[in-house]
Image: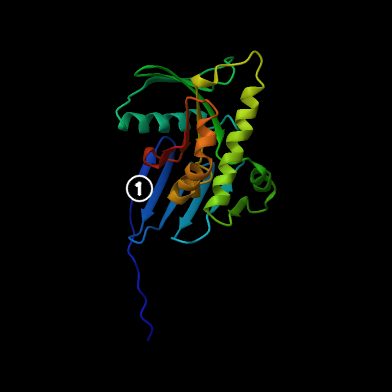
């Protein structure tokens, strides 16, 4: 008879605005993360040493959908860090800004973009079962995907006419579709080690990687 060792997980179930998040962790540093809002269901599983991967199923979401929710999660994280904000609102007609909030030291101007560029979303729309799976070779490749998303959005901000003051812009990288980026801490660590100085040098006010709960938010610059 073969003995099987099972490491019992611990975790939490979170009910957010319009969605449910399940986050379980194991004593060896692994974990699982699930998020569903009735439109999409995202999933990621991680064990130490395994390549980063995620699954997404459901309908293809437009870029502007979920912007307010992503900013709200970031503001909850800031409040926990002692920087409460208020009056979160979406704005139109202000170049480079999706949402505004009143922070402790002034207005927070947030630009939201997905944490990875969207070729897999066209796959989602075409997949018969409305499911896509993406695996990266290692943490570094996943971190490079985040860098590419930052570089793409930064390039678009630089092309705005008239030019905007980038030092006023907080870039919010929405990782709620790509959960492995916030579940596997090695991805953000690799980004900071390999691309942190570059990201800081872009001159933005801040760059945040935002998962489905305030516990899963990481500052990248």
Could you tell me which residue is drawn at 64 percent across and 13 percent down?
162
Could you tell me which residue is drawn at 51 percent across and 36 percent down?
197
- Percent position of residue 44, x then y: 49, 53
Instruction: Count every numbered label the image shows and give the total.
Output: 1
Secondary structure beneath label 1: strand
Could you tell me which residue is drawn at 42 percent across and 44 percent down?
20
Determine whether, in the image, residue 23 is placed left or right of residue 49: left
**Viewer-side residue, 216 vs 50:** 50
- Percent position of residue 2, x then y: 38, 83
The N terminus lies in which quarter of the figure? bottom left
Observer able to see residue 205: yes
Could you tell me which residue is drawn at 61 percent across and 40 percent down?
148
Residue behind mark 1: 13
Observer able to see residue 55: no
Determine whether, in the image, residue 4 is placed left or right of residue 221: left
Determine whether, in the image, residue 132 is placed left or right of residue 68: right
**Viewer-side residue, 98 vs 127:** 98
Q: Is residue 218 above or below residue 12?
A: above
- Percent position of residue 42, x then y: 51, 48
- Percent position of residue 83, x then y: 32, 25
* Among the 4 quarters of the image, the one containing residue 77: top left
């Amino acid at each position: 008879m073969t003995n099987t060792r099972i490491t019992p997980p611990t975790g939490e179930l979170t009910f957010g605005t319009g969605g449910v998040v399940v986050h379980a962790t194991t004593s060896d540093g692994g974990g699982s993360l699930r998020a569903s809002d009735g439109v999409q269901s995202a999933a990621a599983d991680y064990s130490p040493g395994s390549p980063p991967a995620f699954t997404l199923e459901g309908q293809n979401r437009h870029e502007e959908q979920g912007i307010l929710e992503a900013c709200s999660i970031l503001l909850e994280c800031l409040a926990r860090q002692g920087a409460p904000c208020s009056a979160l609102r979406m704005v139109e007609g202000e170049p480079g800004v999706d949402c505004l909030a009143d922070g402790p030291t002034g207005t927070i101007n947030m630009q939201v973009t997905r944490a990875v560029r969207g070729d897999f979303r066209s796959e989602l729309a075409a997949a018969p079962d409305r499911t896509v799976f993406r695996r990266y070779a290692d943490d570094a490749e996943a971190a490079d995907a985040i860098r590419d998303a930052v570089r793409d959005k930064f390039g678009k901000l630089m092309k705005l006419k008239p030019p905007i003051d980038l030092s006023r812009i907080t870039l919010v990288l929405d990782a709620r579709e790509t959960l492995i980026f916030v579940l596997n801490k090695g991805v953000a660590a690799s980004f900071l080690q390999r691309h942190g100085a570059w990201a800081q040098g872009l001159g933005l006010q801040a760059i945040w990687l935002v998962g489905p709960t305030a516990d899963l938010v990481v500052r990248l610059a």
